Image (cartoon, helix red, strand yellow):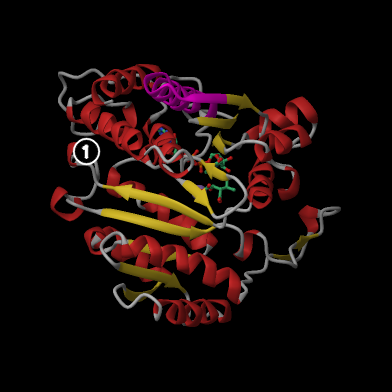
Amino acid sequence: MKLKIAVLAGDGIGPEVTHEATNILRAVAEFGGHEFTFVEGLIGGVAITATGGPLPQETIDTALAADAVLLGAVGDSKYGSLPPDKRPEAGLLQIRQILGGFANLRPSIAYPALANNSPLRPEITKGADILFVRELLGGLYFGIPRWWNRDTPVHCEEAINTMRYTKPEVERVAKVAFELASKRKKKVTSVDKANVLEVSQLWRAVVTEVAKSYPDVTLEHQLVDSMAMHLMNTPRSFDVVLTENLFGDILSDESGVITGSLGMLPSATIGGAVNLYEPVHGSAPDIAGTGKANPLGAILTAAMVLRHSAGLDAEADAVEKAVTTVLEAGHRTADIARNTDPAHAVVTTTQMGKLVLEALTQAL
Ligand code: NAD
Ligand code: IPM
Ligand code: MN
């Protein structure tokens, strides 16, 4: 099969982990006789440096002409004092909006090989397998009005963001969550703040209505504050977790604790013109350029490209199996090296990529 992939590596560790992810995709293509083409584009801080803005038109054109967009990460402290709409992150929000995917799937799995890596006890995390369905195009990120007085920001007395959802926006993402849950453990936990926010009351009412079309799936509602606690206390009790945009951003990073590192988490955004794939983590400026970045989140993101954009389910399974094999053999990047066998030296980003590639050759 043919697949045109737009690669937007971005800032910090983005290019480092994306390189390992594309190596995996190249190997899958070579093995199966598929024609994957990779077209690179600038986004984030590197785009600001090169063109003056975080999302050049050329990148938009490249992304829209592709079958899938693979993104690394954006964010650079160099541009930290710019107003929100000029920062590297604005490029990411804009490309998400342009591509149109509204359902961001963020799986969080407790790998048995990493049981001792999580700060949570193994008996708490054992068997946890959660799929966050995070609404990605609404809520506080995009609600109007949004405002601050940028002429005199230091003296500004007020700033505004708006949490807004419409019924169709909630309906379409809820349907994705229920469809996915009906193929998994048949449970949806919808997260809101309906005890305080009107927008959450709408969210809860619409999700409850959508649930009626899925009698096999159990629906529970959780308030976001206590949900943050339940997630750590009883991670095994969750299947699909449906959230609005900001709540999902926060809870999915928190769920990195279940796996043991944010660097392990992949994501896929579906429902728009072109699917967007990005690891959950950011540009990690604290470790950029040191070879410490864990590429497994990006590699597992590549597996999601194979599953959701190429229909290559067996190959996606093989990539995921290769990751498991490497972890079971004891190989660790620094972020997942807590309580590991001292006989295994900590590996670099590139070495981890190579190890997965070797395991993949066996698995394919
Ligand atoms: P971050 O995810 O970049 O890093 C948080 C912590 O996790 C850091 O200690 C980092 O070293 C570690 N970490 C993250 N990914 C890792 C990996 N693959 N391997 C090993 N360790 C890893 O979050 P932050 O520090 O809050 O944000 C840094 C920048 O990234 C900010 O500019 C932020 O806006 C941006 N960001 C971008 C994205 C994205 O592009 N999708 C996502 C989140 C944050
Ligand atoms: C993420 C990030 C982004 C978000 C930022 C960088 C815009 O934190 O993908 O989780 O908040 O969605
Ligand atoms: Mn985030």
Question: Where 169 sits versus 99, above or below?
Answer: below
In the picture, measured across the screen, residue 127 lies left or right of residue 263, that is: left
Residue 155 image point, x, y percent: 79, 58
Q: Residue furthest right?
A: 151
Please state the extent of the stretch shown in magenta in the rendering.
Answer: 14-37
Magenta segment: does it hold 134? Answer: no
**Helix, strand, or loop for circle 1?**
helix
To which quarter of the image does residue 130 belong?
Answer: bottom left
Q: Which residue is mark 1?
A: 114
To which quarter of the image does residue 356 belong?
Answer: top left
Residue 115 image point, x, y percent: 18, 42
In the picture, measured across the screen, residue 257 lies left or right of residue 52, that is: left
Residue at 33% across / 49% down in the picture? 108
Residue 31 image point, x, y percent: 37, 20
Give the amino acid at mark 1. Answer: Leu
Please rate how many residues cluster around mark 1, counting C-alpha atoms within 10 Å: few if below 14, some from 14 to 19, many from 20.
Answer: many
Question: Where 63 sits versus 209, above or below?
Answer: above
Which of the image's four quarters has the C terminus? top left
Considering depth in this image, is 272 or 160 the residue closer to the camera? 272
Residue at 86% across / 53% down in the picture? 151
Residue 54: in sight, yes or no?
no
Magenta segment: does it hold 32? Answer: yes
Residue 191: in sight, yes or no?
yes
To which quarter of the image does residue 54 belong?
Answer: top right
Specify the principal SS of the magenta part: helix
Residue 273 image point, x, y percent: 62, 49
Question: Where 194 sits versus 107, above or below?
Answer: below
Residue at 32% across / 65% down in the picture? 182
